[in-house]
Structures are given as structure tokens and as C-alpha cells.
């Protein structure tokens, strides 16, 4: 279980709009082999603000997916090398 928060400025036309969201996610991991793993996460957007704190961001859904590959195992005098690819997204509405 993990929680998160972000804040950003979006450039729309001639102006900028601020956006912030608070999220919570739960993830499950499957380790197919010692070097290959997969992760899926589901969660929710809990709260947020849009447009100079005048607008509210409603609750919504969030999801993530990731794959990891341990390319080089750690040795006595060698660090390990791990590659990962992840994708995440959320859906909500600002009112």
C-alpha cells in the first residue's frame, strides 16, 4: 500500500492552470524468476484542487503496471544492474 501526491502547472491556451492530486495505491507483484518480475497496481484519486484552489478534483480511479529485469546479478566486487519499465495513469474530473 502506498500513497502519493503531486502538483503541477498546465499550460492551456493563453494561461496556466495549477493541478494537484492525492492518491492511494495497492500493488501485487509476481516474481516469475529471480531476474524477471511483474507488478500491477490499483488505487484511487482521493482529493485534489484545480485552478488556483478555486476548483475541486473529484475522486477517481488510478492504475499502474511495471516489469523489472535483473540484467546483471550482484557479485563480490560488482553491483547489480536492474532495468524497469512502468506505466501509470489516473482518471478524474475537475469541477
Image: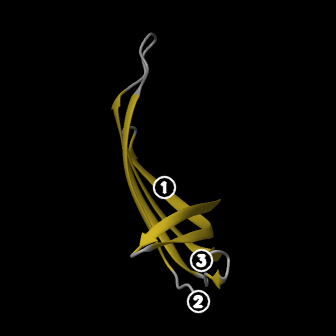
Label 1 neighbour load within 10 Å: few <14, some 14-19, many 20+: few
Coordinates of residue 1 in the picture (x, y in percent): 64, 60
Q: Are marks 3 and 1 in contact (CB under 8 Å)?
A: no
Q: Where residue 94 appears, x then y in whole percent? A: 56, 84
Mark 3 neighbour class, 10 Å CA radius: few under 14, some 14 to 19, many 20 or more: many
Specify few, some or many for label 2: CA neighbours under 10 Å numbering under 14, 14-19, or 20 or more.
few
Q: Is residue 37 above or below residue 15?
A: above
Who comes first in sequence, dot 3 or dot 1? 1
Q: How is the image coloured?
A: secondary structure
Q: Which of pointers 2 and 1 indicates the residue nearer the eye?
A: 2
Judged from the image, the secondary structure of the residue bearing numbered disc 2 is loop
Q: Nearer the viewer, residue 66 or 47?
A: 47
Instruction: Identify the residue at image location x=43%, y=20%.
Output: 79
Q: Which residue is mark 3?
A: 50
In the shown orientation, is residue 33 left or right of residue 28? left
Which residue sits at x=52%, y=82%? 92
The residue located at (63%, 83%) in the rendering is: 55
Label 1, secondary structure: give it: strand
Question: Could you say whether the residue bearing mark 3 is in a helix, strand or loop?
Answer: strand
Residue 16 badge = none
Instruction: Indicate which label's residue lies in the foreground, 3 or 1.
Output: 3
Task: Determine the residue positioned at 63% across, 62% down.
Answer: 5
Residue 95 is tagged as: 2
Q: Nearer the viewer, residue 68 or 91?
A: 91
Label 3, label 1: how far apart the Cα atoms are: 33 Å
- For marks 2 and 1, the one nearer the N-term is 1
Q: Position of residue 17 (x, y in %)?
A: 53, 73
Count of numbered circles on the image: 3
Query: Marks 2 and 1, Cα distance to the nearest angstrom?
Result: 35 Å
Instruction: Looking at this view, name the residue that lies furthest to the front.
Output: 14
Number of the label disc, if any, that sits on residue 29: 1
Amino acid at each position: 500500500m502506498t500513497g502519493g501526491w503531486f502538483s503541477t502547472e498546465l499550460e492551456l491556451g493563453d494561461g496556466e492552470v495549477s493541478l494537484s492530486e492525492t492518491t492511494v495505491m495497492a500493488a501485487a507483484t509476481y516474481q516469475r524468476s529471480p531476474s524477471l518480475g511483474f507488478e500491477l497496481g490499483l488505487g484511487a484519486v482521493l482529493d485534489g484542487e484545480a485552478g488556483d484552489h478555486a476548483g475541486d478534483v473529484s475522486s477517481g480511479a488510478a492504475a499502474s503496471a511495471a516489469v523489472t529485469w535483473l540484467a546483471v546479478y550482484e557479485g563480490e566486487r560488482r553491483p547489480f544492474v536492474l532495468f524497469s519499465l512502468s506505466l501509470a495513469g489516473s482518471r478524474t474530473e475537475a469541477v
